[in-house]
Amino acid sequence: METENKSIRRDALEKLFSQWLAAGKRILAPKKIADKTDFAWIRTLDEVNLDQVQTVQSPKTAIFPRVEELFSFKSSDGLVQIRDRDAAALGEIVVFGLRPCDAAAFAALKAIFTWDCPDRLFSARLEKMTVIGVACARADEYCFCTSLGGDPGATAGSDILLTDMENGQFLAEIVSERGRQAVQTASGLFAPAATREKESHLAKVEPGFNAKAIAPVLASLFDDAAFWEEQSRRCVGCGACAYVCPTCACFDIQDEGGSSGKRLRCWDSCGFQLFTLHTSGHNPRPLQSQRWRQRLMHKFAYMPERQQVLGCVGCGRCSRACPVDMNILEHLRAIAEAKP
Amino acid sequence: MSEADIFKPYLLKIDQVIDETPDVKTLRLVFVDEQEGRDFTFRTGQFAEYSVFGEGECTFCIASPPTRKGYIECTFRKAGRVTTALAGLEPGETIGFRGPYGNIFPIHEWGKKNLLFIAGGIALPPMRSLICNVLDLRKSFNDVTIIYGARSVADLVYKSELAEWAERPDVKLVTTVDPGGETPDWKGQIGFVPTVLDKSAPSSRDTVAVVCGPPVMIKFTFPVLVKLGFAPESIFTTLENRMKCGVGKCGRCNVGKYFVCKDGPVFTFAQLQEMPQEY
């Protein structure tokens, strides 16, 4: 559908929150807790912090929880009963206040979880999610969305994108059918937009490298062990980058609770040595440099080729979270400029 | 298993436990739900996720052939948490099973060809499904040669089948154990699989070779086959990377851009030559 432009006042937004809650929707939004801002289930607009450049964690937990029960089971006397998760019981949610990069990241998750054979719980959560993005008024040195086709005011992935016009009003770009339904339900809270000029309210992020150059260079660098060793020398394999990443989707499956317990899907990371370790002791990616290579190849070469989507949106979280100051933007620049 | 619920396992009951070696067992499994059992189909080369509820899942091939209906077999070495738990189960107990996953050995393209099967140690199971499938359709193929080696006589699995294959006039079976692994009454060969292959291989003419074994055996077997005149497109193997989901999502079994679980586990040597060494 064609994007419709509306506007909404801050006090009307507060009413909108009340309406969502009254309708049984839960709201996931950035909330400041001590010195960190992270996504949390909130009840009022006052709890929401939109001043930060970026939350520590991404909102991917909305559709890909850190630990998710796939089903539960009961065994006794050699007999087993499986109890399915009831996808219909998953509630409607609104993810509010996420940045355009995070909104764009849902497409990468969707590509993985619906590729070839759709994941039932993921698809159900996706179906019940409304995404209300807020454009970026500020960026920092780690942001690089513009290198990857995004920008601080990009609407892709949002159902409605709000831009703070700094006069008590938000420009509301109604991007999807789901967004239009949200506007219709909130009768009277949205007004016609006085202006759609938002550029002056947006952060400036200069492109840092040529993303199109990355995939072919990566392919030619695969066997350059010295290059990957140099790229990853500092990496301690902690996996923090994967945990804060809005598109990282690799997971483990584990049982918990003994013979009458649950089968769980848990976040995992290709940075861990255990990730690929065979029981025999053989490991196809024994070196940290090979695991770093896998991280970049997966996001910038394999996913574009296999799932037609980049596995990175340039949010910069991995660089901010890295305990040894690896800055992915610098690493990607080095790759884009490498002579194959 | 509905298509929409990719992680929900079938329930299978252990019908029989066969001790292959001191630490290798075969389980014969039947579907708890008979209708599910009748509807279940797979093809040789495919694998599955087997689970002990409360311990977790592990990945092995289906070791029985699709031509033998009514049950599924798997063979595994007791090594980690789940296989140790599996090894402790007795007939009548229930396990989880997700599958079949992955691609197949394209035996429908091998009609009237000679077949050479080369296996090492615990890697006979994926090939046993294939060999039994071929023997059940024996008239469709020409000469069948099986070369199987293990570290020692005690490590040879499927001893009853080996005896059966040795008896068959339409199968040439060569068994070997690593030097030092022989017993006083051992009548087979002594030597590593690639060496024995070099001495006993049939002509490469109109012949398909299938190799399953530990990475080191595969590494030394491919060059011997190439030297014997096999085209890389006529040499097949299976890769065994660690897996969790089996359906191309969990992110760990990939070799370059290929998922072993979706694009494999069966690959030709020609394909492997184009793939990075991540297996």
Image: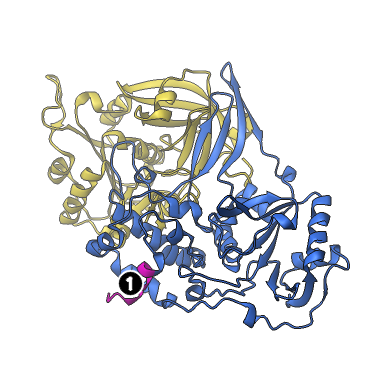
Residue at the spot x=58%, y=50% of the render? A34
In the displayed structure, does residue A104 sit left or right of residue B170?
right
Residue B115 sits above or below residue A290 on the image: above
Q: Quadrant of the C terminus of chain A?
A: bottom left
Of residues B210 and A115, the one nearer the viewer is A115
Question: Badge 1 is on which residue?
Answer: A334
**Can you tell which quarter of the image residue A48 is in?**
bottom right
**Can you tell which quarter of the image residue B78 is in?**
top left
Check the rendered structure and report the hue given to chain B. yellow
Q: Amino acid at mark 1?
A: Ala
Which colouring convention does the figure follow? by chain
Of residues A199 and B90, the one nearer the viewer is A199
Chain letter for mark 1, please. Answer: A
Check the rendered structure and report the hue given to chain A. blue
**Can you tell which quarter of the image residue B215 is in?**
top left
Is A332 magenta? The answer is yes
Question: Which residues fall within the magenta stretch?
Answer: A330-340
